[in-house]
Amino acid sequence: MLALSRKKNEAIVLNNNIEITILEIKGEQVKLGISAPKNIPVYRKEVYVQIQEANTAAINTDGMDALKDLLG
C-alpha cells in the first residue's frame, strides 16, 4: 500500500485518467472528489463488498440445475 500525505485542494492521479482531490477536511472526516472516465465504476468499499457478495451468492446458487431443467 502506498501512503501519501495531501492537503486541502491537493490531488493524486492514478493511471493517467483518474484524479482524486482532497476537497475538505473536518476533524476525522475527509471529503474526496474523484474524477474518472464514465466507463470506470467508482464505489465506496462497503458497497463494492456487497456487490461482490451478491455476485458470489448468485454464482453459488444452483444455476446449473435450473439451466439443465430449462434445456430438458
Image: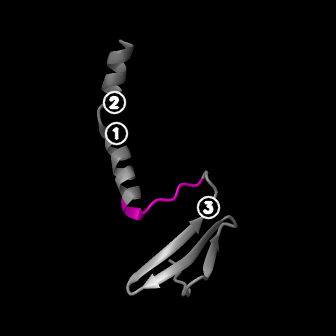
Toward the viewer: 7 or 52? 7
> Which residue lies under the disc numbered 3?
36
- Disc number at residue 41? none
Q: In which quadrant will I find the C terminus?
A: top left
Question: Which amino acid type corresponds to the residue marked 1 in the rendered image?
Answer: Ala
Q: Does the CB distance between marks 3 and 2 fall below 8 Å?
A: no
Principal SS element in the magenta part?
loop
Residue lying furthest right:
16
Residues drawn in magenta: 40-46
Residue 40 picture location, percent across and down: 58, 55
CA gap between label 1 and label 2 equals 8 Å
Query: Tag 3 or tag 1, which sits nearer the N-term?
Result: 3
Q: Could you tell me which secondary element the residue under label 1 belongs to? A: helix
Graded by Cα atoms within 10 Å as few (under 14), some (14 to 19) or many (20 or more), the crowding at tag 2 reads: few
Who's the residue at 50% across and 77% down the image?
1
> Which residue lies under the disc numbered 1?
58
Which of the two discs, 1 and 3, sits closer to the camera? 3
Graded by Cα atoms within 10 Å as few (under 14), some (14 to 19) or many (20 or more), the crowding at tag 1 reads: few
Toward the viewer: 44 or 14? 44
Who's the residue at 39% across and 87% down the image?
27
Residue 29 picture location, percent across and down: 40, 80
Q: Does the CB distance between marks 1 and 2 fall below 8 Å?
A: yes
Give the quarter of the image for residue 16. Answer: bottom right
CA gap between label 3 and label 2 equals 35 Å
> Which residue lies under the disc numbered 2?
63
Query: Tag 2 or tag 1, which sits nearer the N-term?
Result: 1
CA gap between label 1 and label 3 equals 29 Å
Question: Which amino acid type corresponds to the residue marked 3 in the rendered image?
Answer: Ala
Tell me, yes or no, whether the highlighted magenta stretch contains residue 44.
Answer: yes
Question: Which amino acid type corresponds to the residue marked 2 in the rendered image?
Answer: Gly
